[in-house]
Image (tube, rainbow, N blue to C red):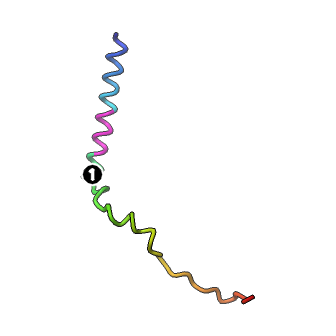
């Protein structure tokens, strides 16, 4: 029976830790931008530069 109480206390502590880190990340603005990551892969950062020494076949 005492093992059950220990497991409940440990699980509540772990859940509280995860909740604390989640609240801190939300307050820190980690989840503010939900549009840009979905379209970021559609745009190139830089245009590829043609090679000066490339020979045409």
Q: Does the magenta stretch include residue 8?
A: no
Percent across and percent down for residue 43 are 44, 74
Question: Is 51 rendered above or below residue 2?
Answer: below
Percent across and percent down for residue 55 are 73, 89
Seen at 72% across and 89% down, the residue is 56
Seen at 51% across and 81% down, the residue is 47
Question: Is 25 rendered above or below residue 55?
Answer: above
- When asked about the image quadrant of residue 4, the answer is top left
Question: Is 29 rendered above or below residue 54?
Answer: above
- Extent of the magenta region: 15-22
Majority secondary structure of magenta residues: helix
Near mark 1 (Cα within 10 A), the count class, few <14, some 14-19 or many ≥20, is few
Q: Where is the C terminus found, in terms of image quarters?
A: bottom right
> In front: 44, or 20?
44
Percent across and percent down for residue 16 are 28, 34
Determine which residue is flagged by label 1.
Answer: 26
Label 1's element? helix
Percent across and percent down for residue 6 are 34, 18
> In front: 52, or 42?
42
Seen at 30% across and 28% down, the residue is 12
Q: Where is the N terminus found, in terms of image quarters?
A: top left
């Amino acid at each position: 029976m005492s093992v059950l109480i220990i497991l409940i206390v440990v699980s509540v502590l772990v859940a509280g830790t995860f909740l604390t880190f989640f609240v801190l990340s939300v307050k820190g603005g980690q989840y503010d931008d939900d549009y840009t990551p979905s379209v970021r892969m559609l745009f190139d950062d830089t245009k590829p530069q043609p090679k000066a020494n490339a020979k045409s076949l």
